[in-house]
Image (cartoon, rainbow, N blue to C red):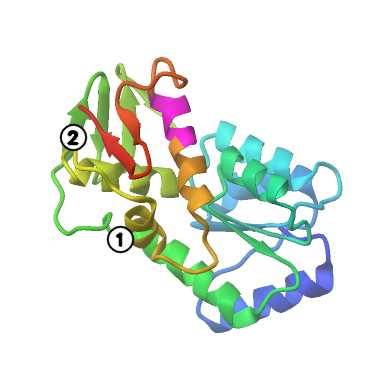
Amino acid sequence: MEDNRDLALGLQMNLEVQGYAVQAVHEGTAVLEAARAFRPDLVVLDLMLPGIDGFQVLSDLRAAGVDAAVLILSARGEEVDKVRGLRLGADDYMVKPFGLMELLARVEALLRRGAASPPGGAEPRGESFGDVVVEVESRRVMVAGTQVNVTPKAFDLLVALLQRNGRVASRLDLLRDVWGHRSAVESRTVDTHIAELRRKIEADPAHPRHILTVWKAGYRLQR
């Protein structure tokens, strides 16, 4: 979703050369309808869109249950914009101007992460703690019997914590397992997605019972 039609056309052509099926949308008000019709695996989203801005588009996508990976591509490079985008459910954030090869690599990584099983090899069909059930194969999270929507990266983060069976995972561990430890991804990204998980699955996110912070060490999951 990009309002600069020349840039959008260039991105579309380069992605199609790589074998991807691409649909370009130029107005924020048309994004949700297009996502429902096209059912994309990945959305590349500009923030400066006519109609409604990219932040509202992203919020609407997640509220509607669209769980495609979202890569924000924007000239807005302030930390506050990056944090806001990640908190609303984006999986990655790139600042314009950008390198085409890096963009293609990030697209590939996001799609690979969505298509593959979570890191660590064979997984059980379901894991539970408290009133939370994580269905690994179907990538669903149930809280007290009700499905909650989490972003693809937040889901992978939750599985990475589950795999450690209560052991502490440092931010670097989680960056490696979930994001491939790319230098462009900051440890704050982990914190932002942890906060999202707490909002979705903890009864009191300010005083979590399950996703715990271990001071100066990282995070662990307590069943």
Q: Does any portion of residue 114 appear in the rendered image?
A: no
Q: Residue at x 75, y 73 (%)?
A: 97
Q: Is residue 22 above or below residue 80?
A: below
Checking the image for residue 162, the label placed there is none
Label 1 CA crowd tier, 10 Å (few <14, some 14–19, many 20+): few
Q: Residue at x 58, y 45 (%)?
A: 86
Instruction: State if disc 1 and disc 2 touch (CB < 8 Å).
Output: no
Residue 46 appears left or right of 71: right
Residue 51 appears left or right of 93: right
Q: Secondary structure at mark 1?
A: loop
Magenta span: chief secondary structure: helix
Checking the image for residue 127, the label placed there is 2
Q: Amino acid at mark 2?
A: Glu
Q: Does any portion of residue 182 appear in the rendered image?
A: yes
Residue 127 appears left or right of 80: left
Q: Is residue 97 above or below residue 80?
A: below
Q: CA distance from mark 2 to mark 1?
A: 18 Å
Q: Is residue 168 above or below residue 100?
A: above
Range drawn in magenta:
195-201
List the residue tagged with mark 1: 116
Q: Is residue 197 inside the magenta stretch? A: yes
